[in-house]
Image: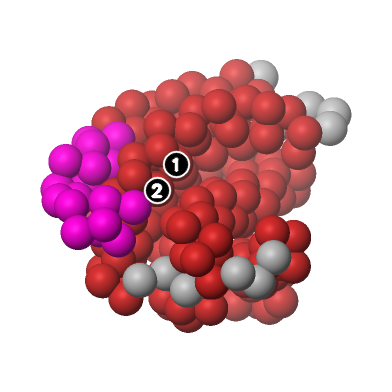
């Protein structure tokens, strides 16, 4: 089963490479969103440094949302998803492999770009490790929650709008604890409670998410 799951994850990576620029849309959006904020709120360093954690986290959240449309929809349209549902490998494992691949392809570039953007926004250097830690611990929850939403809107009209309405409220706890941890680090406070809460959210999502997503996919395929 592990070999089959790794094969599915490898397929997702190969498809992402073939799609080229489409696979980089999330990180391009992330960079542009962070760069545009100084034009909207002004160039004052003190203001930008104060809101930098929120800017980075909101941009990362929206970039993750932007990348969810291709998680299941392409396979659903060409019939691949139905074949995967009929394969000997449990659909829950298929979902877990696809979500893991999505997270690595999305979170990896975000983690690379985040310190540079935080530096541009004037975030205190002491908060950089906390920023990377929160993104590493919180983005898995974003991917898993997003996968549930992506499965629920399969075949629906205006799926992108419905997906945003479904999952953005569920993203709020991750956003709150992620920003709070970076703020705490910037003020010299402990970040451990926030990091533990983020890890707990991602762990809970990893346990609940794949079976829920698989059930939603089966419902869409009927």
Tell me the residue that label 1 is attached to.
175
| Image quarter of the C terminus | top right
- Residue 127 location, quadrant: bottom left
Q: Is residue 113 visible?
A: no
* Residue 98 within the magenta-colored segment of the rendering: no
Q: Is residue 183 visible?
A: yes
Q: Secondary structure at mark 2?
A: helix
Left or right: 51 with respect to 153? left
Frontmost of labels 2 and 1 is 2
Q: Residue at x 84, y 32 (%)?
A: 158
* Residue 191 within the magenta-colored segment of the rendering: yes
- Judge the density around disc 2: few (<14), some (14-19), many (≥20) Cα neighbours within 10 Å: many
Q: Position of residue 180 (x, y in %)?
A: 34, 45
Looking at the image, which is closer to me, 29 or 92?
A: 29
Q: Position of residue 186 (x, y in %)?
A: 30, 61
Looking at the image, which is closer to me, 176 or 75?
A: 176
Q: Position of residue 212 (x, y in %)?
A: 43, 24
Q: Which residues are magenta?
A: 183-201
Q: Residue at x 67, y 52 (%)?
A: 66
Q: Residue at x 42, y 69 (%)?
A: 123
Tell me the residue that label 2 is attached to.
179
Looking at the image, which is closer to me, 61 or 66?
A: 61
Q: Secondary structure at mark 1?
A: helix
Query: What main secondary structure does the magenta stretch of the protein show?
Result: helix
- Judge the density around disc 1: few (<14), some (14-19), many (≥20) Cα neighbours within 10 Å: many
Compared to 206, does 51 lie above or below? below
Q: Is label 2 in contact with label 1 (beta carbons under 8 Å)?
A: yes
As drawn, the label of residue 133 is none
- Residue 45 location, quadrant: bottom right
Compared to 201, does 128 lie above or below? below
Compared to 211, does 35 lie above or below? below
């Amino acid at each position: 089963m592990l070999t089959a799951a790794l094969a599915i994850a490898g397929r997702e990576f190969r498809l992402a490479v073939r799609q080229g620029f489409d696979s980089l849309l999330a990180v391009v959006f992330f960079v542009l969103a962070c760069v545009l904020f100084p034009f909207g709120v002004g160039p004052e360093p003190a203001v930008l440094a104060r809101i930098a954690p929120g800017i980075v986290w909101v941009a990362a959240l929206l970039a993750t949302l932007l990348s969810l449309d291709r998680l299941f929809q392409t396979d659903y349209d060409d019939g691949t998803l139905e074949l995967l549902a009929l394969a000997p490998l449990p659909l829950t494992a298929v979902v877990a492999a696809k979500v893991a691949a999505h997270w690595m392809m999305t979170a990896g570039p975000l983690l690379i770009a985040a310190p540079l953007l935080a530096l541009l926004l004037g975030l205190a250097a002491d908060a950089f490790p906390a920023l990377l830690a929160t993104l590493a611990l919180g983005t898995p929850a974003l991917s898993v929650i997003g996968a549930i939403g992506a499965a629920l809107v399969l075949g629906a009209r205006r799926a992108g709008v419905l997906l945003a309405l479904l999952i953005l409220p569920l993203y709020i706890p991750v956003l709150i604890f992620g920003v709070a941890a970076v703020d705490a680090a910037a003020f010299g406070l402990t970040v451990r409670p926030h990091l533990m809460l983020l890890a707990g959210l991602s762990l809970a999502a990893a346990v609940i998410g794949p079976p829920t997503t698989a059930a939603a996919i089966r419902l869409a395929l009927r």
